């Protein structure tokens, strides 16, 4: 798909961000506490990595621009819902360098904000295309179930999680929404045969990304006593199953596997994921040098 020059990934991302914000607020009274909480959270966007992956996949698969924007907004809205809930349940007081929603507006408002964003995410996905609405909503529902299962397992992990348990949590809690970023465009492009590969590719990336993130936090987590850090779990351990002697090699294994899977997706729709894997692998190599 050759985009009009005005339709770059950045311009579509801006449209997606605007759409997600406007639709989530459309039925709320301006100035109300819930309205203010959502405006507050959405005013500090993160990397929007999942939205970018979705837009890139939609472009590669030749989807209509408006549909691509709606799918991207759905994925990012779902991600934001998970962040608000995650902060509340993990008792994390900050998000993106400032107070988390629950800390600033209270626990009840955080629950309400999560519920509204979940509802809005489904509405956005269904609005991407009436012909595919049922399949899109079904795909979204699976992603929500898997993510919540990962969050539940994380909450119940105890003080000394095993490495296998940590991988399973990362697969569902971190990987599922990366998978969804590829799945929704594939569903709308009628590439049902590629969904299993997209799911596995996204979850492999989610695991690799989580290990990479744990490597960045290794020193601070060591000081704080965070036993859930996979990089710390691996110290002094050889993981023959994944051909890894160090946490860095552990991350590389999953990132390389994710890149390989992304390369096999139709019409190059996994291209941006390959680029992300390459960037993380390069940083790991640079840090190890």
Image: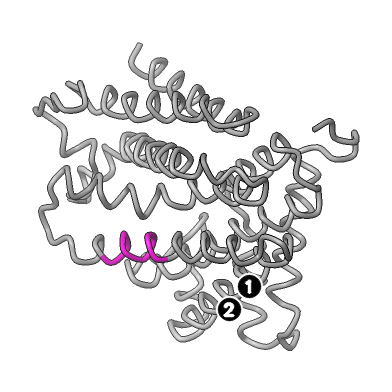
Q: In which quarter of the image is residue 80?
A: bottom right
- Residue at the spot 85% in from the left edge and 35% down from the top edge: 3
255 or 190: nearer the viewer = 190
In the displayed structure image, the side of residue 68 where residue 174 appears, left or right: left
Magenta residues? 145-152
In the displayed structure image, the side of residue 245 where residue 3 appears, left or right: right
* Picture coordinates of residue 136, whole percent (x, y): 59, 60
Q: Residue 230 carries which label?
A: none
| SS assignment for the magenta stretch, majority | helix
- Pointer 1: what residue? 120
The verdict on residue 147 being magenta is yes
Real-space Cα distance between discs 2 and 1?
6 Å
233 or 243: nearer the viewer = 243
- Residue at the spot 20% in from the left edge and 42% down from the top edge: 222
Quarter of the rendering occupied by the N terminus: top right
- Pointer 2: what residue? 116
Kind of element beneath mark 2: helix
Kind of element beneath mark 1: helix
Residue contact between numbered discs 2 and 1, judged by CB atoms under 8 Å? yes
Residue 168, placed above or below residue 123 = above
Residue 57, placed above or below residue 173 = above
158 or 275: nearer the viewer = 275
- Residue at the spot 24% in from the left edge and 28% down from the top edge: 247
* Picture coordinates of residue 43, whole percent (x, y): 67, 62
């Amino acid at each position: 798909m050759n985009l009009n020059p005005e339709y770059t990934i950045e311009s579509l991302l801006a449209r997606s961000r605007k759409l997600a914000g406007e639709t989530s607020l459309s039925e709320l009274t301006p100035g109300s506490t819930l309205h203010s909480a959502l405006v507050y959270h959405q005013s500090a966007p993160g990397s929007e990595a999942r939205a970018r992956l979705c837009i890139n996949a939609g472009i590669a698969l030749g989807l209509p621009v408006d549909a691509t924007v709606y799918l991207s907004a759905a994925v990012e809205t779902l991600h934001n819902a998970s962040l608000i809930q995650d902060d509340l349940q993990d008792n994390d007081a900050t998000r993106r360098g400032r107070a988390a929603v629950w800390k600033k507006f209270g626990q009840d408002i955080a629950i309400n904000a999560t519920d509204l964003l979940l509802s809005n995410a489904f509405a956005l996905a269904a609005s991407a295309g009436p012909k595919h609405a049922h399949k899109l909503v079904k795909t979204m529902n699976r992603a929500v179930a898997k993510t919540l299962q990962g969050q539940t397992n994380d909450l119940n992990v105890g003080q000394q999680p095993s490495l296998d348990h940590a991988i399973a949590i990362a697969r569902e809690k971190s990987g599922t929404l990366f998978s969804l970023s590829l799945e929704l465009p594939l569903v709308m492009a009628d590439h049902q045969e590629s969904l299993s590969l997209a799911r596995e590719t996204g979850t492999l990336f989610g695991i690799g990304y989580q290990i990479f993130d744990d490597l960045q936090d290794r020193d601070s987590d060591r000081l704080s006593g965070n036993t859930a850090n996979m990089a710390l779990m691996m110290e002094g351990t050889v993981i023959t199953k994944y051909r890894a002697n160090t946490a860095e090699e552990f991350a590389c294994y999953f990132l390389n596997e994710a890149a390989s899977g992304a390369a096999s997706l139709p019409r190059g729709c996994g291209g941006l994921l390959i680029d992300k894997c390459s960037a993380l692998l390069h940083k790991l190599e640079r840090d190890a040098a």
